[in-house]
Amino acid sequence: MTHQILKRALELRPELAKFMMDIISIPSLSGGEKKVVERIADEMRRVGFDKVWTDGLGSVIGQIGNGPKKIAFDAHIDTVDVGNRDLWSFDPFKAHEKDGKIFGRGAADQKGGMASMVYAGKIIKELGLGKDYTIYMVGSVMEEDCDGLCWQHLIKEEGLRPDLVVLTEPTSLNIYRGHRGRMEIEITVAGISCHGSAPERGVNAIYKMAPVISGIEKLNGRLATDEFLGKGTITISQIRSTSPSLCAVADSCGIYLDRRLTWGETEQSAIGELREIVSESGIKADIRVPEYRQAAYTGKVYPTKKYYTTWKIEDDHPAVVRAKEKFALVFDAKPKVDKWTFSTNGVAIMGMHEIPCIGFGPGNEEQAHAPNEWIEIMHLVKAAAFYAAYVG
């Protein structure tokens, strides 16, 4: 049966590639996914899904079967913006095919996973696979802005709690079983403004922040390491200040931090490290984890703290073992098992709600957020075959 699955996936290559180019050509920044959701829902219905609907945040869900085992496949369908257009050699939102690749914003990150999932559904229906399963194919929204928010909503508000989730973020067709968590942190200090011609009359908030900045740079070198997930990291991504004018001493200074959390690191431990640096600097500072509260395209606001939990599952977990077995059967090769460098919706699914996740996706992680983004069409085909075989 596994060879029949791959054969059918290869036969569907033209349809799959066309659908992929269609959804790339619909811009879908976070909070603006409505049109691509409608296109995906139409394709799900066309290829034979049993049920298709959207949740309160606007994620699209296609269901196949009604068996006792519940499995979900997830692809976020929002993308980052294109950045500097001068770095692109083509229109990012006019997908095109060349040399066995499809080019356009979101090709690898990660509309490829969505396209492969939909056509895996077609194969599952045609070949009568997954009789013991209820299968959910989820096109999730707002992931680029806030990892896992969509799944917090699906689990807590919609009651969708599968036994396992396959994340289809790009893995170069390898099997992934975790990644570091992350959090965003703001540190602010206050100063006293005065005329810039006599700075000694005031207290410059930027100077107050300087030893904190130095301490954070040093902290990055001594953060914990995990054998599988690697080292925790911290970096300052933004610095800003205020003053009454450009001829005045700064009366406030703020820095924004990107903190990547390896195994064993938590929100509390990360904040504790920063409090120690501030204390050693001899200043008062406000340290806080900001909240995400942007509106979905549906108009709904679903706030969450910008803390995204680290997660991993073991190499001998049944979900990983099954993935390796199915990979070997479909592709007659031994898979590589690894992890993502970046973060995914697994921060909520596994990290917060302890629903096991594995990763398998078309496309290369290095293409994420890059100009001239592309994906190999054969990656799409092989991913569709793997997803169908996983429930077969």
Image (cartoon, rainbow, N blue to C red):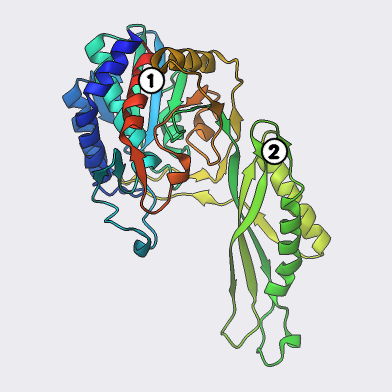
Determine whether the residue tagged by mark 2 lies in a helix, strand or loop: loop
Quadrant location, the N terminus: top left
- First in residue order: circle 1 vs circle 2: 2
Rendering coords of residue 237 (x, y %): 58, 59
Instruction: State left or right for residue 323 relative to residue 194.
Output: left
Quarter-of-image position of residue 239: bottom right
Q: On residue 386, which mark appears? A: 1
Rendering coords of residue 311 (x, y %): 59, 31
Rendering coords of residue 236 (x, y %): 62, 59
Query: Residue at 66% across / 89% down in the picture?
Result: 196
Quick one: which residue is furthest to the left in this view? 46
Q: On residue 265, which mark appears? A: 2
Q: Amino acid at mark 1?
A: Phe
Instruction: State left or right for residue 91 relative to residue 263.
Output: left
Quick one: which residue is furthest to the front in this view? 99
Q: Is residue 192 above or below residue 370?
A: below
Instruction: State left or right for residue 111 relative to residue 11.
Output: right
> In front of the other: label 1 or label 2?
1
Q: Is residue 244 above or below residue 266?
A: below
Quick one: which residue is furthest to the bottom in this view? 197
Q: On residue 285, which mark appears? A: none
Query: Residue at 34% across / 20% down in the picture?
Result: 385
Q: Determine whether label 1 and label 2 are within 8 Å by CB.
A: no
